[in-house]
Image (tube, helix red, strand yellow):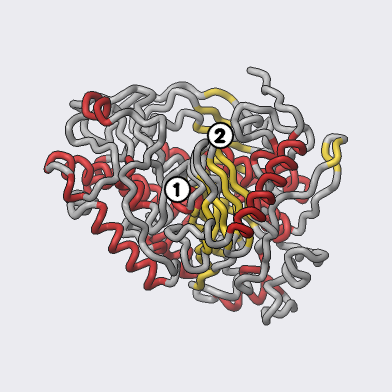
Amino acid sequence: MVNFGSPRRELTRRRFLGSIALGAGALGWTLASGAAGKQADPPASRPNFLIILADDMGFSDAGCYGGEIATPNLDKLADDGLKFSQFYSTGRCWPSRSCLMTGYYAQQIRMDPPGGKLPEWTRLAPHYLKPAGYRCYHSGKWHINGARNPCRDGGFDRSYNLTDQHRFFSPKTHTKDDKALKPVKPDSGYYATVAIADHALECLAEHAEKHKGKPFYHYLAFTSPHFPLHAMQKDIDRYKGKYDKGWDVVRAERFKRMTDMGIINCKLSPLQPNVKPSWNLSEGNLAKNIGPGEAGRAVPWSALTDKQKSFQATKMAIHAAMIDRMDREIGRVLKRLKADGVLDNTVVMFISDNGASAEQIIRADMHDKKAAPGSWRSHLCLGPGWSTAANTPFRMHKSWNHEGGIASPLIVHWPAGLKASGELRHNPGHFVDILPTVMELAGVKRSENWKGKPTPPLAGRSIASVFTKDNSVDHDFIYFHHTAHRAIRVGDWKLVSAGKKGTWELYDLKTDRSELNNLAAKHPEKATELSKLWQAKETAFRKQAGPRVRRKRR
């Protein structure tokens, strides 16, 4: 673990904020007027931003969210910062990334379903920040459909774009500053998580040397722990035998820790043995292509054979190793920020693009049954059993709009600007809120035109005031739609439906965030009200996006 805390934290904060009070209602210069009000003039030293995104990491995987996986650097960020309990993604990778970068719901900008072209009025984060003097960097996964090149289309100054997310040891397609790099040979020593951090360190070193004094925005997007389960053997070895007790026990232990931490106030959802993505391989094909140890459903651990128990425990050890390594690489980046003297005035945010994945498919180099699990010749997926554990205590998985698919951790660390440390925030929020928050803290205002086109207001709201006072930002609604899954949240009420044939379900998330007590029959008027609101927003968002235009191949 990197010891990146500041022993003179209060002094640093007061020097940064100058004469602005840190009392109730004022976090600093940007928050004195509230999230929706007129912004105050920023100080000369604007904050830097480091937005860290994990890929397919479950809500309870990190230690600070109740997990047993070693994440000391994330835990330290949470201990010295804030931890959000009700923050949301879209439930899938590319729509979440488009929300994060633009501040709009994916349906407003033709990004879900995928393959469309962004409306001409769409801006990404660098388009707002660079005119204000920010240098902008991207390291890792991109996957923003409609903006193929991070530098040319996204406005970033530097980028390492790992487009091949299915080969952690030997990617065939990746670019640097929009220029193609050579494919990496297997057994070359390359590992994606390390390479992504290496590029971030390269950008930070260049920034310190050539652009010292300028603020920066760095988007650090890891591919871990997305399938296939690929990890370095030394990392896997740390978790050998750790998961022999099975997913039932791991879920119960995580649930207790999360409850004790105050992260959740609900029951533990039951296993759902009949729930899995429709595109998964059948259980027969899993046995044929992977082996007799594979399990295609989230059944009780006691129902598995000894071979299945051993194999499943190994898979979870690899998943844990991927997250462990990501945390270690985050630590390297934080250590560099501290060495450069900029960590205290860097707003660090950590999130995950969706819940853990129940997918079980084979892509890329396929799967060699004789290969060591986790090696480049293997292609394993976490599967529904361990995905259920990773998403404790919620139902469903990646791609669904139930809580298991959309609940994301959010850690915020900013010594120079946060008065509170080690506190929870229960204010709901969504990926669309990240960009408005960054803009407020950076003192950037949105112009009403872009490339000669009028721009609609951002869908998100700044949650900067929540850094000082919990539940200080109200959302009129939080909207979800991915594939045939739908949901809308208003206050503590949530309406959600799964699949094309799914009916609307109504839940009171104040006491039932695990979505076990469907109140649609008891409160039909509320279900009708929210269903009409969802449809109104769906219609308005599609109209705002305009006719679907396919992007041109380059």
Q: Position of residue 475 (x, y in %)?
A: 67, 60
**Foreground pick, 78 / 388:** 388
**Secondary structure found at label 1:** loop
Identify the residue under disc 1.
355
Q: Position of residue 409 (x, y in %)?
A: 48, 57
Task: Give neighbour class at mark 2: few <14, some 14-19, many 20+ (Cα, 10 Å).
Answer: many
Q: Give the Cα separation between the discs numbered 1 and 2.
A: 17 Å
**Amino acid bearing label 2:** His
At a point 49% along the width and 54% down the height, the residue shown is: 407
Relative to residue 260, is residue 86 drawn left or right? Answer: right
Identify the residue under disc 2.
143
**Secondary structure found at label 2:** loop
Relative to residue 292, is residue 221 drawn left or right? Answer: right
Q: Is residue 215 visible?
A: yes
Relative to residue 68, is residue 102 drawn left or right? Answer: right
At a point 17% along the width and 46% down the height, the residue shown is: 303
Q: Is residue 136 above or below residue 436?
A: above
